[in-house]
Amino acid sequence: MAYIEVRHVTREFRSGTQTTVANRDLSFEVERGNVVTILGPSGAGKSTLLNILGGMDTPTSGEVLIDGTDIAKFSTKQLTTYRRQAVGFVFQFYNLISNLTARENVELSSQITQDARDVSETLELVGLSQRAQNFPAQLSGGEQQRVAIARAVAKKPKLLLCDEPTGALDYKTGKQVLRVIQDAAQQTQTTVIIVTHNSAIAQMGDLVIRINDAQIQSVTPNAHPTPLD
Ligand code: ADP
Ligand code: ADP
């Protein structure tokens, strides 16, 4: 059984007489441990889909099976538990706490769960052992994003959701950061979803899902996931 099964997911937003369909009849499957990239222009519906997968929003209709459980049927309380226990987030602008060191930023998230991965091990996983005592302002953009990745994987999420994780980085640094995400996913059997509007970055995925105008245009398995140069 696939780790994620999205079946006929539609998300409409209504305000007054206006209805916006942000996701229209999306269906796809993701195997455990895969890195999936979701590619599409601004307004295509990528964040809406990511929010649904992360338990921050629920679809108007359709099923979202995570490891066989339909989170679309979850109550608000169940969704909160799901987010805390199963999901890690990486954002475009790192969201590190500026007066805490790299290590302390990672510790912050790993304290949340009992099942946390060791902080030193996690910093090593992203290649930042030497920078553990540095504050965010002393780190480059790529290093800050690696701290954010360490913070997200320290809580041992089953699902790692990344919203434009390379959006604030130059292309070369972005590729390195994606490599770190790939390695971390592989070593920890985490399933990763990366939203991007950059088609070169999207080639890092084991599976590339293109969305446009709220609909899936293509779902393409990638035999040799590598970034384009
Ligand atoms: P993307 O992440 O690809 O830029 P979004 O998922 O953010 O796209 O948005 C898809 C469409 O849904 C857009 O037309 C957007 O304006 C609309 N939308 C997203 N969230 C809301 C909301 N909370 N209320 C109303 N419309 C929304
Ligand atoms: P968009 O690009 O459509 O404006 P964002 O990328 O800003 O959306 O946010 C995507 C989702 O992640 C939203 O549900 C938002 O609430 C959440 N989010 C964004 N930034 C943070 C953050 N720093 N901490 C927690 N949640 C966040």
Image: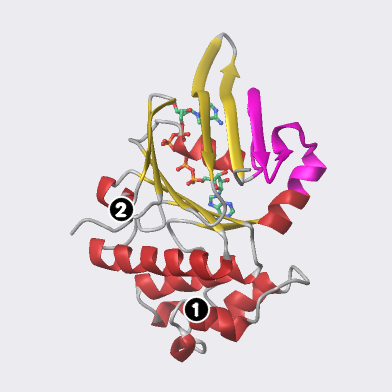
Disc 1 to disc 2, how far (Cα)? 21 Å
> What's the residue at 56%, 78% (across, down)?
122
Callout 1–callout 2 Cβ contact below 8 Å: no
Q: Residue furthest left?
A: 229
In the displayed structure image, the side of residue 19 where residue 166 appears, left or right: left
Residue with the mark numbered 1? 125
- Amino acid under label 1? Leu
Density class for disc 1 (Cα within 10 Å; few <14, some 14-19, many ≥20) is some
Q: Is residue 108 above or below residue 3?
A: below
Secondary structure at numbered mark 2:
helix
At a point 58% along the width and 75% down the height, the residue shown is: 105
Quadrant into which the C terminus falls: bottom left
Residue 216: % across, % down: 42, 28
Residue 151: x and y in percent read: 57, 70
Q: Is residue 144 above or below residue 6?
A: below
Q: Does 156 sit above or below residue 66?
A: below
- The N terminus appears in which quarter of the rendering? top right
Q: Residue 99: give its label.
A: none
Residue 132 at what x, y percent from top left? Answer: 51, 87
Q: Is residue 68 visible?
A: yes
Question: Which label was assigned to residue 201?
Answer: 2
Q: Is residue 78 magenta?
A: yes
Which region is colored magenta? 55-80
| Mark 1 secondary-structure assignment | helix
Q: Residue furthest top?
A: 17
Question: Which one is in front, 53 or 112?
Answer: 53
